[in-house]
Image (cartoon, rainbow, N blue to C red):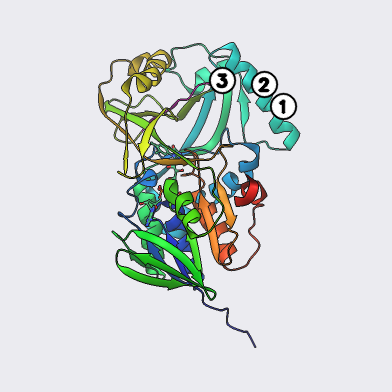
């Protein structure tokens, strides 16, 4: 006789990509799930990011997670149905435009080979040029990953939220979690909509997560908040089939289906967690724009129509926190350090595994909450 699996009551704090993907995989597997979100689904980093779906250039420790996530991205329709149309796979090219970039690329190639990874392929400069005929700067070559691409971020997050809802999850928006406390094996949350109880809490509260964890009795984790910035141009005829990065420089560039160029890559400003706001420092963003103009003269005169930033949590080693907290039933998933959107689907699956006491497919040791 099959013994039915226990149905845990789980509260996921935070309606970003990680919270929504976690809730989706938990609800799909029969758990009783609520997402509690202070603002609304995809309001913060997960909804306003550059949408880069990039396995290229990951820290070695993150590659297995990133590749596992790519497997989900490539079959996203199976999970979130028509919302998956918001993902546009193409290829990612990170080029070397100076000797420092080339040296960095050579060291990276050796590191990848030693570690046994072959998803990043080094292209010679002539191959880079034939892949990017409109490129106006000579290169020393670059790394290519086929199948990386970009997505409209808020649509993907909504897709996971909707999927979670269809599997029975409850989504409670505009509900700030003030505090959480463990009492007799039961988590009790004080929120602006009253008290909630759960067997498990998954802390996906983004840049706010470490403070919430500390308040609940966890050791202090060194999460810092910043506001990575983006700019978008007017529409232009299509010239750029790939997402572009530059080795040794903080830049990401893509042309989305509207013809607009999105310019970002990690240049960041100050964030104010209390006020839910991030600054935009134009002189910093202008450096990225200048680099874009050098790479593609066709983009040099495209009007910038909007700049913005989003609030993101950074860890000192730029690796996320994914794993069990010190207290039973508390699980953390935060600190994605400006590259967590692509990881979201696999992180959601791994966090759901942890709640259900199953061994995640991907080793999570490098992301242990107690590593600091
Ligand atoms: C401008 C920008 C560009 C980026 N570009 C990329 C990119 O191209 N590719 C990539 O992979 N990554 C990118 N990132 C990083 C990526 O967006 C983040 O790593 C990821 O979205 C983090 O998701 P999250 O669910 O952990 O956090 P969030 O999206 O921040 O979600 C956390 C949620 O928790 C809620 N919350 C917090 N405290 C409470 C509380 N007390 N009670 C209730 N709710 C609470 C918040 O309101 C928030 O909605 C970028 C980030 C930014 C800001």
Q: Identify which residue is drawn at 33% across, 15% down.
A: 300
- The quarter in which the C terminus is drawn is top right
Name, please, the residue furthest toward the right: 114
Label 3, label 2: how far apart the Cα atoms are: 17 Å
Q: Is residue 19 above or below residue 110?
A: below
Read off the residue under disc 1.
110
How dense is the environment of label 2, judged by Cα within 10 Å: few (below 14), some, or many (20 and up)? some
Read off the residue under disc 2.
106
How dense is the environment of label 3, judged by Cα within 10 Å: few (below 14), some, or many (20 and up)? few
In this view, the residue in front, 2 or 308, is 308
Magenta-drawn stretch contains 254: yes
In this view, the residue in front, 44 or 125, is 44
Q: Do the numbered discs 1 and 3 sit on residues whose CB atoms are within 8 Å? A: no
Name, please, the residue furthest toward the bottom: 1
SS state under label 2: helix
Highlighted magenta segment, given as a residue range: 248-255
Label 1, label 3: how far apart the Cα atoms are: 20 Å
Q: Is residue 349 left or right of residue 158?
A: right
Magenta-drawn stretch contains 194: no
Residue 354 placed where, x, y %?
A: 59, 62
Q: Do the numbered discs 2 and 1 sit on residues whose CB atoms are within 8 Å? A: yes
Image quadrant assignment for residue 45: top left
Read off the residue under disc 3.
127
Q: Earlier in the sequence, mark 1 or mark 3?
A: 1
Q: Is residue 313 above or below residue 169?
A: above
Labelled disc at residue 289? none
Image quadrant assignment for residue 285: top left
Label 2, label 1: how far apart the Cα atoms are: 6 Å
Residue 210 placed where, x, y %?
A: 48, 50
Residue 274 placed where, x, y %?
A: 33, 45
């Amino acid at each position: 006789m099959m013994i039915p699996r226990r149905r845990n009551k789980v509260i996921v704090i935070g309606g970003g990509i990680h919270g929504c993907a976690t809730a989706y995989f938990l609800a799909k597997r029969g758990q009783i799930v609520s997402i509690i979100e202070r603002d609304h689904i995809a309001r913060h980093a997960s909804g306003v990011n550059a949408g880069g779906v990039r396995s290229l250039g990951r820290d070695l420790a993150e590659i297995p997670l990133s590749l596992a996530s790519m497997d989900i991205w490539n079959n996203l329709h199976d999970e979130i149905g028509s919302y998956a149309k918001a993902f546009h796979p193409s290829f990612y090219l990170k080029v070397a435009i100076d000797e420092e970039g080339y040296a960095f690329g050579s060291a990276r190639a050796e590191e990848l080979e030693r570690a046994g990874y072959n998803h990043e392929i080094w292209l010679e400069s002539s191959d880079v040029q034939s892949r990017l005929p409109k490129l106006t700067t000579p290169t020393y070559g670059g790394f290519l990953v086929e199948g990386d691409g970009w997505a409209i971020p808020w649509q993907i997050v909504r897709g996971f939220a909707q999927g979670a809802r269809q599997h029975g999850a409850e989504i409670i928006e505009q509900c700030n979690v003030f505090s959480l406390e463990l009492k007799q094996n039961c988590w009790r949350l004080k929120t602006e909509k009253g008290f909630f109880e759960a067997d498990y809490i998954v802390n996906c509260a983004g840049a706010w997560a470490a403070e919430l964890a500390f308040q609940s009795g966890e050791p202090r984790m060194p999460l810092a908040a910043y506001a990575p910035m983006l700019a978008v141009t007017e529409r232009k005829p299509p010239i750029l089939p790939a997402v572009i990065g530059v080795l040794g420089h903080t830049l990401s560039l893509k042309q989305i289906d509207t013809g607009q160029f999105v310019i970002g890559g990690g240049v960041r400003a100050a964030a104010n967690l209390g006020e839910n706001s991030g600054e935009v420092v134009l002189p910093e963003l202008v450096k990225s724009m200048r680099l874009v103009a050098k790479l593609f003269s066709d983009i040099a005169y495209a009007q910038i129509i909007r700049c913005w930033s989003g609030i993101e949590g950074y860890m000192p080693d730029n690796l996320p926190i994914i794993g069990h907290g010190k207290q039973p039933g508390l699980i953390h998933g935060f600190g994605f350090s400006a590259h967590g959107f692509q990881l979201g689907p696999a992180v959601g699956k791994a966090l759901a595994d942890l709640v259900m006491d199953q061994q995640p497919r991907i080793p999570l040791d490098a992301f242990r909450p107690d590593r600091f």
